[in-house]
Image (cartoon, rainbow, N blue to C red):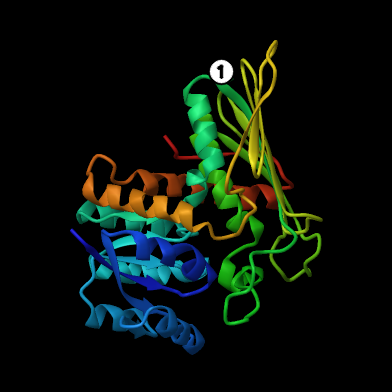
Amino acid sequence: MKYRGAIVGLGNVAVAGHLPAWQQNPDFTLCAVVDPVEERLALARHLLPGIAYYRRIEELFARERLDCIDICAPPLLHDVLLLAACQYNVHILCEKSLTLSPATWQGLHSYTEEQPRVVCTVHNWQYAPLFQTLKKLLAANTVGPPGYLELITLRTAPAGRVLTGENSWRLDPQVAGGGILIDHGWHVFYLVPWLLACKPRTIAVQLKRRRLPADAVEDTATGTIAGVDARARFHLTWAGERRSNERLLRGSKGTLRFDAASVVIEKSGEEPRKQHFTEPLTASSYHPEWFAAVLEEFQREIEDPSARGQNLQAAALCLALTERAYESHRCGGIALPLNNLD
């Protein structure tokens, strides 16, 4: 079956990350683009001649017969677009953060329960060669059960301006919903339980504005997530002096040290072993190869009822961690329990 779809929001991530995967996957065909900005629709006409173009999602659903949509709009626009898509009974793929509203998440969950439909979030870092390798090393018990994970993401600025030359929406709290905790923190919140194979129980976070003005979003987030047998520390910033990713994962029998391009396996009594990756995490902000795997995950949930809902549950945890992270910061950075996760 070939799935007929549309992209809603034609910014950088759609053009550089999503479009290549849509065009290369033989099971999906792109029928339309929705964007309220004329310059982006002009770009769509240039990149995608022959498809339909709309300014509003209501126009899209009134005129097109679709199986799915791919939402690439900024986070605070997601809720309206998600709920509109539910009215038209389509499968939904959405950029992170899926939603910052528990009520919206509950509505999406009810939608997937009532209809044989899928809602998936773009958890693309899970498909990076580095993280896939780490997961395989852990599955092979290379360093024993993991007990501590450290994730450090340094950036000199938010992801670049959209192709039309506008200022980055990531700095506007009325569009982004938050700063680096929303942008990069969501990645941390699905990677930590996936890598450590543990359920988070508490989170403690402190946020700062190191370079941005007082009325802007946070540009730095430092925190700890703890489970019963493992914990993770993370440090994320847009105010770094360089662009890099540095990480450490400690198990009972050894340590995995990894940066954006390699992982080093360290075990007592053995020479360290190093593996390199062809595409570093710092290569770009969009990673079309990773999105190709996300699109395959989306298709798998559509076609395999036993896989359906797994991604939506991961998004629920990301939402809970995000909410408690901001609350922890407001309380002075204390550790707060995560409720109702059992």
Asked if residue 107 is positioned above or below residue 258 in the image, the reply reads below
In this rendering, position of residue 244 left or right of residue 232: right
Asked if residue 260 is positioned above or below residue 215 in the image, the reply reads above
The x and y percentages for residue 280 are 61, 48
In this rendering, position of residue 287 left or right of residue 292: right
Question: Is residue 235 in view?
Answer: no
Asked if residue 137 is positioned above or below residue 47 in the image, the reply reads above
Tag 1, which secondary structure?
loop
Q: Residue furthest top?
A: 269
The x and y percentages for residue 149 are 63, 32
The x and y percentages for residue 165 are 62, 81
Q: 10 Å neighbourhood of mark 1: few (<14), some, or many (≥20)?
A: some
**Residue sitting nearer the eye, 174 or 128:** 128
Residue under pointer 1: 144
Residue occupying image coordinates x 42% and y 67%: 19
Residue occupying image coordinates x 35% and y 43%: 310
Question: Is residue 4 in view?
Answer: yes
Tell me the kind of residue under disc 1. Answer: Gly
The x and y percentages for residue 300 are 29, 47
**Image quarter of residue 342:** top left
